[in-house]
Each structure stands twice: as C-alpha cells, then as structure tokens.
Amino acid sequence: MKFTTLELVFEGAVARIWLNRPELRNAFDEVVIHELSEAFSQAGAASEARVIVLGANGPAFCAGANLNWMRRAAEFTHEQNLADAGGLAEMLRTIHESPKPVIARVQGDTYAGGMGLVAACDVAVSVDTAWYCLSEVKIGLIPATISPYVLRAMGTRAAQRYFLTGERFSAAEAHRIGFVHEVVAVDALDAKVAEIVKAFTGASPAAVRACKQLIADVAGREVDDALIEKTVQGIADIRASEEGREGVQAFLEKRKPSWISG
C-alpha cells in the first residue's frame, strides 16, 4: 500500500511509522486512520521488525481530529457516526494489540485523539516542551473512543480532572500522572528512544508478546482461582517454549541468547 499521510520505514529490527502532515499538525481523518491501521498491521507482520516506533514530523505530534473531517462528521447520520467512530476504535486497537512492542516518540503537542494514539502504545517518551490536552468537552464532545487507553494510562483520578475540564497540561504533569514514561529535553529524545529500543531487542520476542497478553489478561482482574490457573499455565507454557528453553540455557551458560545478534 502506498501511504499519503504517513511514512513506514524499516531500519533493521525497528519499524518506524511517521505521521507526515506537519502543515495540518498531523491531525487525523478517515484516511490517516485507515493508513495507520494498515501501517501497524504491516509492521506487526514483518518478521524482521522487533519493535515499532510511532513518531511525527513537524512541531506537533498530533492535534486530534482534522477540522475538515469534523465539518463532514457534523452532517453525518447516527449510523454514519457509528461507522466513523468504529474505524478509529479499530485503529487504536490495532496499535494496542500489536504483537510487537510500540514506542510513542512524542516530539510536540498532543491533543484529543492524539492522546489516544500515545496511550495505545506500550511506552511513551515525551519532550519536555510538549503540551497535552483532552479538549473534547470544549466543543461539546467526549473522549469516548480513546477513553479505554487514556484511562489505563493516566488513571481514573487524573481523568476525572482532565476529561471534564479540558485543561492543557505539561509534559511534566503527563509524567507525574503516568501518562508518559519519560520526559527528556528535545536533543535527548532520540537517544532515550534508542535506549528503550535496545531494551526491547535484547528481550525474547516471544516473551514480549506473551507479556503483552499477560498484562491484558491480568490487569484489573480479581485474584481468584481462574486467574491463578491462567498465570500458572502461562509460566508453564513459556518455560516449555523454544525461546524459553534457549533463554534459560543461555543464562546458565553465560552466553547471549539466539535472538541477540553480534
């Protein structure tokens, strides 16, 4: 597929997806949503890719919905709105459920739906000059489609403020509430992303996939017999797997496991 709103580049073990409409502050519409879904599907399926980095070109990471798309949506029927929102929901789920770990490289302001993109990623690294805002209430809307991901990232208490007020908040505040994992100076952004990429590529690909599923299975669940049985089964399965056996053997033999080259 030829992309018109973003770039997908493979650099060794890293798949880089760049939002590439800086003149529109990388705001999204139905085309961007479709292309993001396709790019993440391609990157997730690429055997050479071990980690995906989502970045953006220009001063803003993502300003949320494109104004022209919002104008069109204002004339939609209820059925059309359902279909339109469904496309956004599926795109976010594609990012969140990617079999490869995903890093958000946030180089600028991130508003509304853009916060959904960041929250759907596994790790978020932000420059200290970025501002964040869940601005939907200011125009009579709610952050419904992005809420499952944003709530998990910032927690209910912070959401009760920022969903309801639509206030802008700083990268430092985003870090304090847990929405982003790291805040760095602009000139340190790529080094920090590279550090996390290295950590991911040093880990077992199969174990990383299994850990993503483990978090999805366990988070928020009551600790009951069913959950305990599931976790017991999980460790038994991974111990018996090819990479599980290789990793333990490499540790005991004091050598690098097979998934680390060089």
Image (cartoon, rainbow, N blue to C red):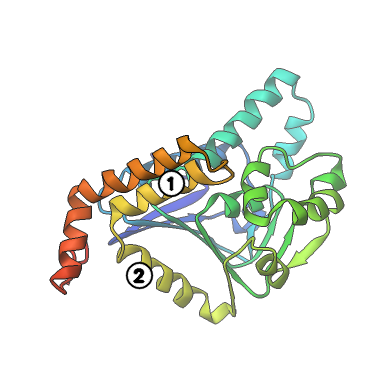
Percent of width and height locating residue 175: 65, 68
The residue positioned 23% from the left and 54% from the top of the image is 244
The quadrant the N terminus occupies is: top left
- Residue 218 in view here: yes
Question: To which quarter of the image does residue 77 belong?
Answer: top right
> How far is the residue under mark 2 from the one under mark 1?
22 Å
Where is 254 relative to 169, above or below? below
| Mark closer to the observer (2, 1) | 1
- Residue 96 in view here: no
**Residue of label 1:** 214
The residue positioned 32% from the left and 53% from the top of the image is 207
Percent of width and height locating residue 170: 74, 69
Amino acid type at image mark 1: Leu
Percent of width and height locating residue 178: 64, 63
Report the number of numbered marks: 2
Position of residue 157 in the picture relative to residue 102 (left or right): right
Question: To which quarter of the image does residue 196 belong?
Answer: bottom left
**Residue of label 2:** 198
Residue with the most extreme front position: 225
Q: Secondary structure at mark 1?
A: helix
Q: Residues within 10 Å of mark 1 (few under 14, many from 20)?
A: some
Q: Nearer the viewer, residue 209 or 54?
A: 209
The residue positioned 20% from the left and 47% from the top of the image is 240
Percent of width and height locating residue 18: 49, 56
Q: Nearer the viewer, residue 59 or 156?
A: 156
Badge number at residue 117 = none
Q: Secondary structure at mark 2?
A: helix
Q: Nearer the viewer, residue 234 or 56?
A: 234
The quadrant the C terminus occupies is: bottom left
Amino acid type at image mark 2: Lys
Question: To which quarter of the image does residue 141 belong?
Answer: top right
The residue positioned 70% from the left and 73% from the top of the image is 172
